[in-house]
Image (cartoon, helix red, strand yellow):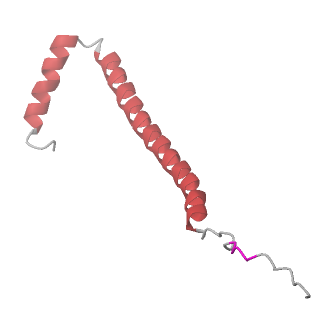
């Protein structure tokens, strides 16, 4: 049933818990354990959702940056120094 615990072991554990906490406290104890498990599951699902949202946001911000980085950089044509025109002398 629960790994190596058999039916008799579970009954023995339940009997010991009943002796320690008493019959009046068992419903409250069960309710507290149930709430704790429910809260744990909720926090795990919320953590997964928050992590997924953060990853999606990171991918959205990374995509435009990659597009900008992948565009070739256009540079202006180099300016070539040309000699100034020489005055023509008519002699």
Residue 23 as seen in the image, left or right of residue 12: right
Q: Which residues are magenta?
A: 79-83
Left or right: 6 with respect to 64? left
Principal SS element in the magenta part?
A: loop
Kindly give the residue lying farthest to the right in the view shown.
90
- Residue 44 belongs to magenta span: no
Residue 11, quarter of the rendered image: top left
| Residue 66 coordinates in the image, percent (x, y) | 55, 61
Residue 61 on image: x %, y %:
57, 52
Quarter that holds the N terminus: top left
Q: Which residue occupies the foreground of this view, 72 or 36? A: 72
Q: Residue at x 78, y 75 (%)?
A: 84
Q: Is residue 1 left or right of residue 35?
A: left
Q: How many marks?
A: 0
- In the rendered image of this protein, does residue 71 appear above or below residue 3? below
Q: Residue at x 28, y 17 (%)?
A: 26
Please say whether residue 80 is one of the residues in the magenta stretch: yes
Q: Residue furthest front?
A: 91
Identify which residue, 36 or 77, lies in the foreground. 77
Q: Nearer the viewer, residue 69 or 12?
A: 69
**Residue 7, percent across and down?**
11, 37
Nearest the eye: 56 or 84 = 84
Q: Is residue 72 left or right of residue 26?
A: right
Based on the displayed image, in which of its 4 quarters is residue 62 positioned? bottom right
Give the residue drawn at x 42%, y 34%: 43
Q: Which residue extends farthest bottom?
A: 91
Q: Position of residue 79 (x, y in %)?
A: 70, 72
């Amino acid at each position: 049933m629960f790994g190596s615990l058999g039916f008799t072991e579970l009954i023995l554990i339940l009997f010991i818990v009943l002796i320690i906490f008493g019959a009046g406290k068992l419903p409250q104890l069960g309710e507290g354990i149930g709430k704790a498990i429910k809260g744990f599951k909720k926090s795990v699902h919320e953590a997964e959702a928050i992590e997924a949202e953060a990853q999606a946001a990171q991918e959205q911000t990374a995509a435009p940056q990659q597009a900008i980085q992948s565009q070739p950089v256009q540079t202006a044509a180099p300016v070539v120094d040309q000699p100034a025109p020489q005055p023509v002398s008519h002699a």
